[in-house]
Every structure is written in structure tokens, then in C-alpha cells.
Amino acid sequence: MKSLFLKYKFEILIVLIGFLWIEFLNFILQLDIQNRISPDAESYFESAYDLYFLHKGHQYRPVFLALIHGIPFLFGCSNLEVFKACYPINFLFWIGTGLLLFKILCNILTLKKSFYISLISIFFIGSAICIFNLYSENIYLFFIVLGFYFLQKYYVNSKFLFLSISLSIFIISMLIKPGAKLFAIFLVLFFVKEILKNYNNKAIIFLYGSFFLVLIQCGLLKKQYGDFTISYIDSVTYYNYLGSKAVCLSQGKKLNQLDNPRMDYIFSISNTETKKIAFDDLINQISNNKFYLFYAYLSDVYDNSTAGNTALDYTININNTGYFKFSKIFFFTISKFQNMFFTIIGFFLSISMFFSSYKKEPYFSLISFFVLYTIFLSGISCSQGDRFHLPILSFVLILIAKKIFDKTKHSFEPLQK
């Protein structure tokens, strides 16, 4: 037992410290007894309920995420209990992300440095608070980090098996957050030569399997709503947020989602119509309102880069403790600072490393591309706090570790056979 502990002491410490940290936040901020259910959480619940009891897909939330969120139904949980059960489910994905980050860093730094930097990710306030909400952030981040973990193994060992697993995970991530689809498509195209060269390799079954899951998702929506698509969420998000803000700015108004006639309209029409209306609106604004559309986009990116955690902002002092108000303000401020600091550092560091590493160490260029992709994509929406940028924080840590602490000359290029 002692030898086992010594072998995995850092992993055990990450789990232990992570658990104690989450319980500490839970105790002082009363996170597990909050009664507010956000609209996003409601839609995540609806998708899980539809899948498990009505055996159908959801127009906004993909089936793979619904499958995970609905696990409590398998144990007889009631509808309300599903919202509470998100805590243990999200915790497993959250702590799993920390462990994977540690493993990735171990190929760059010493064990101790990898451990200490991994602990920084444990103390990201936004990700920790999201554990207590029926959100997708921690589940999505786990799969993205898992994808990069296997991608690193591919670059270290030059085995197609690891590349196939990695790409299949990135493809499946589209079924957690549809916004990941362009990044997944980019990666498939980036490795298309390697894929074609190994088309008869047994390991390609992982890629086929992930494509099949995507086809199932698209097929469900085609059957139910008439469009062969992963989700309608992109059209609705653009129309309600970026498009609405551009219109408001052109009229000298401030966007108010509680009084947004565009939102009422887009939710009053069929899903198929939303895609057409949103696309036509985008083309119209590019043609006739491009200045305010671009201004709105920059405003959204700024908003998502400087905001604190909204789930924490909405917590209330149910137990009437004297330290709640200070604790809430303190941790909200920390979440805001973490978002700003890592977004700014991540943006400039990613630009630098994307161009400097793409030939010798493409692994870090791909991480840089993901960070930039996430930041730029966040411009389609606003008023979501730090949630859009939470996925990049762990990867910025990897880039910082590589830039500052890694003094070796090794490369993650595949070995030549």
C-alpha cells in the first residue's frame, strides 16, 4: 500500500486537495442548497429527459451530453434530484481534468513542477462553481483535455492508434458543445494525410465510431425537425445575442435580454425557420450594418474576457451566515481576475507559439489554435460570465509551462519509421 501511494502520490494529492477545496467552497458559499435553476440548466435537463423517457433528441443540446446528464435517471432519481446529482458527476469530470493536465505536463516538466501547476487549475473559481450546476463546461473541458492527452501520446509514440482515439474524442466533443465542430473539422483536415495513409489500420474504428455517433445526432434532428444538423443552438445564439446587440447599437440602445423582441420572435417559429432567419439576418447585417455588427462582436469578446462567474453571482445567503457576502464578493472578484489574466496571457502567448511552434512542435501550435478559436468563437454571445473562456484556462497553463519552465530541446514530432 505504501509503495502504491508513493507511486501515485501526486495523483492522490490532486484528488484529495481538489475534494477538500470543493467542499470548502460548498460550505462557505452554500452551493449545494441553491434553488435557482438557470435557463441553460433547464434545457440541459430537458434534453436528458427527452432522451431517457421520450427517446428523442433535443433541438439545442446533443444526445451525448444528454446521456451523461441523465445518468441519475438510471438510479431512480426524480426530476429535481437530477439537478442535485450534477455535483458528483461534474466533480468526476472536473478532477479527471486536473489529473489529465498533470499527465500532460509530466511530458514537459518535472513531476513536482507538473504537480504544482496542475494545482493552479484546481483553484480556478469558475470551473469549481460550475460543478454545482447542470452545465456542460466541466464535461466539455474533460473531453478536450483528454483529446489533447492522446494527441500528445501520438506525437511522443508515433502510433496511429493514439491519433485515432484523439480525433474521435474531439469529434465526440461536438456532441457536448456544438460550437466545437469547426475545431474538430480543422483537426480532421489537419491530419487527413495520416488518416488516409492508415485507412486500413484497425485503429481507425475509433474514428468511424465517432462519425457514426454524429450521424445519429444529425439523423435524429432530421427526423424530428427536418434539418440534418447537430444542433440549432448556433442560429439561436447568434440571433439573440450578437445579432440583437448589433441592432441595438445601431439604434443607440443597450441590449436587454429580458425585453428582447428578437428573442421572442426566434422562439416563436419552427426550428427549421430559425436557421433561415438567422442566416438571412447575418447576411443582411454584413451588408447593411457591418460596423455595428463588428462593434458588437468586439464588445462580446470583451464581455466574455472580463466577466466573473455568473453562477456564483446568483447565489443567495440561504443559511444567513455572516461571512457569506464577503466570501461571495471575494471569490467573484477572483473569478473575474482569473478570466481576464488568463485570457490576455493566453491570447498573446497563443499567437506567439502558434507561429513559432507549428513546424517543430505542432502539438503546442494546436493547443494555441484551440485557445484562439475559443476566444474568437465567444464573440457570438455575451452575458454568460466567464463560462465561454473556462475551457482555455488549463491550456494556457500548458503554454505558460512550456514557455517559461521547459528548458529542454525535445520535440513532439512523430518518430520517423
Image (cartoon, rainbow, N blue to C red):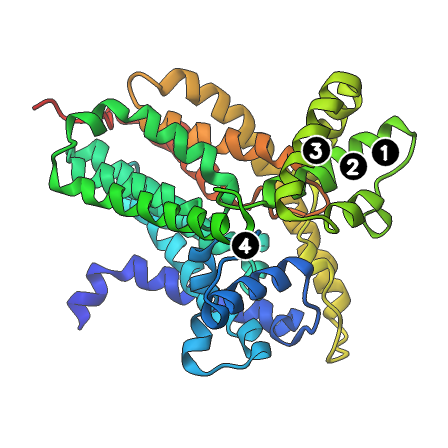
Residue 14 visible somewhere in the drawing:
yes
Q: Which residue is at 59% across, 67% downward?
A: 25
> Of marks 3 and 4, which one's residue comes earlier in the chain?
4
Circle 2 residue: 244
Left or right of 52 in this view: 381: right
Residue in the foreground of this view, choosing between 48 and 315 = 48
Circle 3 residue: 302
Say which quadrant the C terminus sits in. Answer: top left
What's the distance in space between the residues labelled 4 and 2, CA to CA? 28 Å
* x and y percentages locating residue 10 in the rendered image: 31, 57
**Residue 375 against residue 120 in the figure, above or below:** above
What's the distance in space between the residues labelled 3 and 4, CA to CA? 20 Å
> Of marks 4 and 2, which one's residue comes earlier in the chain?
4
* x and y percentages locating residue 22 in the rendered image: 52, 66
Say which quadrant the N terminus sits in. Answer: bottom left
**Residue 122 against residue 214 in the figure, above or below:** below
Q: Secondary structure at mark 4?
A: helix
Residue in the foreground of this view, choosing between 134 and 199 = 199
The amino acid on which the numbered mark 3 sits, given as a three-letter code, is Tyr
Circle 1 residue: 248
> Of marks 3 and 2, which one's residue comes earlier in the chain?
2
What's the distance in space between the residues labelled 4 and 1, CA to CA? 32 Å
Circle 4 residue: 127
